[in-house]
Structure formats: C-alpha cells, structure tokens
Amino acid sequence: LLQIEFEDVIAEPEGTHSFDGIWKASFTTFTVTKYWFYRLLSAIFGIPMALIWGIYFAILSFLHIWAVVPCIRSYLIEIQCISRVYSICIHTFCDPLFEAIGKMFSSIRATVRKEI
C-alpha cells in the first residue's frame, strides 16, 4: 500500500521551519490536492484500467490453464519414457565400467608424511 505523507515530500530539516501559517496552508493544500486529484484520476481512468487489467488477467489465466500446464504435463509424460530408456542404457553400459575402475583404484593407499 502506497502511503505518501506531506512530511515525506516537503521535509524541512530540524532548525529550519517556515511560519506556522504557511506550514499549515501548505499541508492543507498538499493533502486536499492529493485527495481530490486521486479521486479525479480514479473517476476518469479507474473503470477503463479495471477493464484492461481484467482482460489481461483473464487471458493470462486462460493461457495458463488451457495451454501452459497441459504442455508441461504432456512434455513430462513424453520425457518419462525417454528417461527410462536413458536410465537403462546408463545402468547397462556405464555401471560395469565404473565398478571395474573403482575396484582397480580401491587397492591404492595414500600416506602423508611430514618430514621435519
């Protein structure tokens, strides 16, 4: 939520202040102008912007529900078959090779000595 206060816009530093009457008139002018100008802009552009944003989010929801999610699920179903074939190939060809290499290197022992 956007909250803009008079002190956020017109900030007089400590020790430098205008006359109280000027400060109060400025505060009232700022507050009333902000309030009524917001209402005026809301009255002029509120309904058209609501219509535009409503259409935008309706299209976005429609595409997400009827296009994006079905495409992703279809892809996952199709890739599942390929992943099984890939897994079988890896286990068939790579597992024996890696086990053999592991057994070859399992007998190697490394020792670290510190000589002074």
Image (spheres, helix red, strand yellow):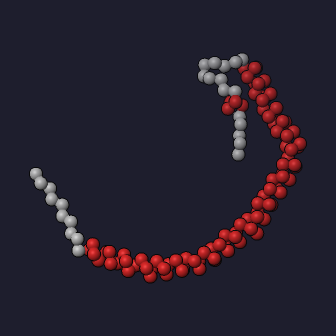
Q: Is residue 100 left or right of residue 15?
A: left
Residue 11 coordinates in the image, percent (x, y): 66, 26
Q: Nearer the viewer, residue 30 or 62?
A: 62
Pick whichever, 108 or 5, lies toward us: 108
How many marks can you see? 0
Residue 16, picture quadrant: top right
- Name the image quarter holding residue 60: bottom right
**Residue sitting at x 23%, y 74%:** 107
Quadrant of the drawing holding the N terminus: top right
Residue at image location 70% in from the left, 27% down from the top: 10
Q: Is residue 6 above or below residue 63?
A: above
Counting from the top left corner in percent of width and height, residue 67 is at 74, 68
Residue at screen point 76% across, 24% down: 26
Q: Is residue 113 found left or right of 48 in the rendered image?
A: left
Q: In the rendered view, tell whether residue 34 sits above or below residue 75.
A: above
Residue 8 position within the rendered picture, expressed as x and y whole percent measured from the top left: 67, 32
Q: Residue furthest left?
A: 116
Horizontal and vertical percent position of residue 62: 78, 65
Q: Is residue 101 above or below residue 41?
A: below
* Left or right of residue 115: residue 103: right
Q: Could you say which quadrant of the image residue 114 lies in?
A: bottom left
